Amino acid sequence: MTSKRPKAEAKIQIENERVIITEWRFAPGAETGWHKHGYDYRVDA
């Protein structure tokens, strides 16, 4: 299954032995696509 929607852009802000902090940028209509979370996560908007 392939989407024609634009992909969100990810930029790692901090990565160490305790956390990975990623900033996501979404253009109108953008999506991350199907994925799995390998760690606990939190979303702030």
Image (cartoon, rainbow, N blue to C red):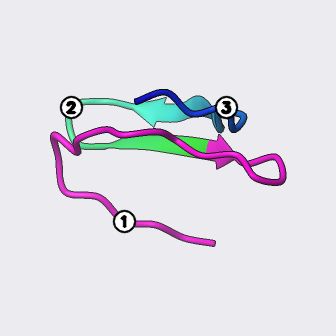
Mark 3 and mark 1 lie on one chain; the one further toward the N terminus is: 3
Mark 2 and mark 1 lie on one chain; the one further toward the N terminus is: 2
Please name whichever residue, 8 or 20, is drawn nearer the observer in this view of the structure. 8
Q: Estimate the x, y position of residue 43 in percent, counting from the top left.
A: 46, 66
Please name whichever residue, 26 or 39, is drawn nearer the observer in this view of the structure. 26
Q: Estimate the x, y position of residue 42 in percent, counting from the top left.
A: 37, 65
Q: Is residue 38 within the magenta segment?
A: yes
- Within the image, what quadrant is residue 38 found in? top left
Query: Which residues are the magenta region?
Result: 24-45
The residue at 63%/72% (across/down) is 45
The residue lying furthest to the front in this view is: 1
The residue at 62%/45% (across/down) is 24
Kind of residue sitting beneath label 1? Arg
Q: Look at the image and tell me in which quarter the N terminus lies.
A: top left
Is residue 24 left or right of 33 when viewed as pictured? right
Say which of marks 2 and 3 sits in front: 3
Q: Which residue is mark 3?
A: 4
Q: Secondary structure at mark 1?
A: loop
The residue at 17%/46% (across/down) is 39
Q: CA distance from mark 3 to mark 1?
A: 27 Å
Is residue 27 left or right of 35 when viewed as pictured? right
Q: Which residue is mark 2?
A: 17
Is residue 34 left or right of 13 when viewed as pictured? left
